[in-house]
Image (spheres, rainbow, N blue to C red):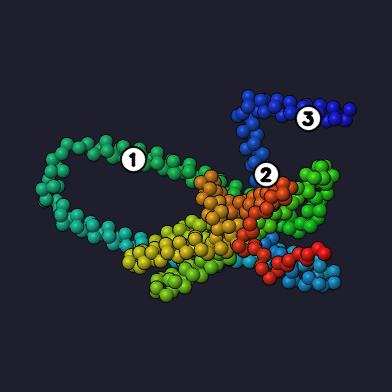
Amino acid sequence: MEDKKAKAKWIIGIVGICIAIYVGLQHLDRVVWAVRWLFRLFVPLVMGGAVAFVINVPLRPLERHFFPNSTKPWVGKLRRPCCIVLAILIILGMFAGVGVLVIPELVSAFSILGHSISSAAQSLQQLNLQVYGENSAIMQFIDSLDINWADIQAAVIDWVKNSAMGVVDSTVSVVSRMVSSVINFAVSLVFGIYILSSKEKLKAQAVHILHTWLPEAFTKKFLHIAGVVNVCFRKYVVGQTTEALILGSLCAIGMAILRLPYAPMIGALVGVTALIPIVGAFIGASVGAFMILVVNPVQSLVFIIFLLALQQVEGNIIYPRVVGSSMGLPAIWVLAAVTIGGSLGGIGGMLLSVPTASALYILIREETAKRAKAKGLPPLPAEPAQAVPKQSIRKKPRKP
């Protein structure tokens, strides 16, 4: 009897899902609008979770060293807020330090470029007067042409008016988007701080709800997957930051050895942009090459050649080993994940591709090992970084 009821519920569920899919396809425009509305509604909350996750990376070691064994009540109350503030200050300090190094020099480079363009324009004007003077044959030929300059002037004025209106509309749109982004980020930061202030309580509540409302087998599997994803993303943030520090330091040291200008500033910029996997350093390279180009074009070419070589070393040796080994992901899959993620989602896809691929790799490997054991097959060979040392392998004692 119970089997028949379960089968009837299963059939009703399948039919209900099919009906919902059919209705959704018939009103696809409304479904898309509803999904976009829900996405905009939950964007600050999702961003808040992401902000909390990033802040939690430096927060964990701070809490381990900030009076962890103190029995004083006031220390226990102030411990978490102080660590949260310190973690936020560390993150903001890193970006502020890079901004202090980069922005003034970048403004100076644009100023030098402006003076260079002005000098070049004056030189061209003098050359124009020498070659195309008022008494030259070319100017006499231009004067002999029957050109209605009034119509041309009116057309140019109309074009400038239309362009100006377009620029105004674009400016208003950009400003409104910036204000909206600032408000969303402020809400996300506040939400992230609330998450961090009571993360143990929220975790316990979420686990209790899962155990209460969902089957036990599914709950255990879901919690295991969530744990693997959490560890992979946390190790990815740590590994990516370490790799960025290494690349920025190597860039600054190499530029100092080659006696290139702006070595500390460009090294810091390359390190920050290297947070974008594989291709991030090229973004810093373009800005650095432009700044050196204003000072010395030959040194700019030397810098490009140096950074291309350094990028090859970083992309094929440093990045796969530092990030891949810290996450248990082989180097070939790191490169494959970055390539596929960049093709699907651009910079955001690159940022999320490596930890996602690492989590999938670990989960698939675990499931494959279970299935192989159930079928009596040998397990997959261990990765070199995870292989068991020979000294730790003990022979089983023989049965008498």
**Which sits in the foreground, 339 or 285?**
339
Residue 137 in the image: state x and y as whole percent: 10, 48
Residue 386 in the image: state x and y as whole percent: 65, 62
Q: Would you identify the image quadrant in which residue 330 lies? A: bottom right
Instruction: Point out the frontmost of discs 1 and 2.
Output: 2
Of the numbered discs 1 and 3, the one sitting upstream in the chain is: 3
**Which sits in the foreground, 193 or 133?**
193
| Crowdedness near tag 2: few (<14), some (14–19) or many (≥20) residues, C-alpha within 10 Å | few
Q: Which residue is mark 2?
A: 42
Mark number for residue 372? none
Q: Is residue 268 left or right of residue 62?
A: left
Distance in Å between CA atoms under marks 2 and 3: 32 Å
Instruction: Point out the frontmost of discs 2 and 3.
Output: 3
Distance in Å between CA atoms under marks 1 and 2: 46 Å
Pointers 1 and 2 in contact (C-beta within 8 Å) = no
Of the numbered discs 1 and 2, the one sitting upstream in the chain is: 2
Pointers 2 and 3 in contact (C-beta within 8 Å) = no
Q: Which residue is mark 1?
A: 157
User: Label 2 amino acid?
Assistant: Phe
Q: Is residue 376 above or below residue 16?
A: below
Mark number for residue 10? 3
User: Label 3 amino acid?
Assistant: Trp
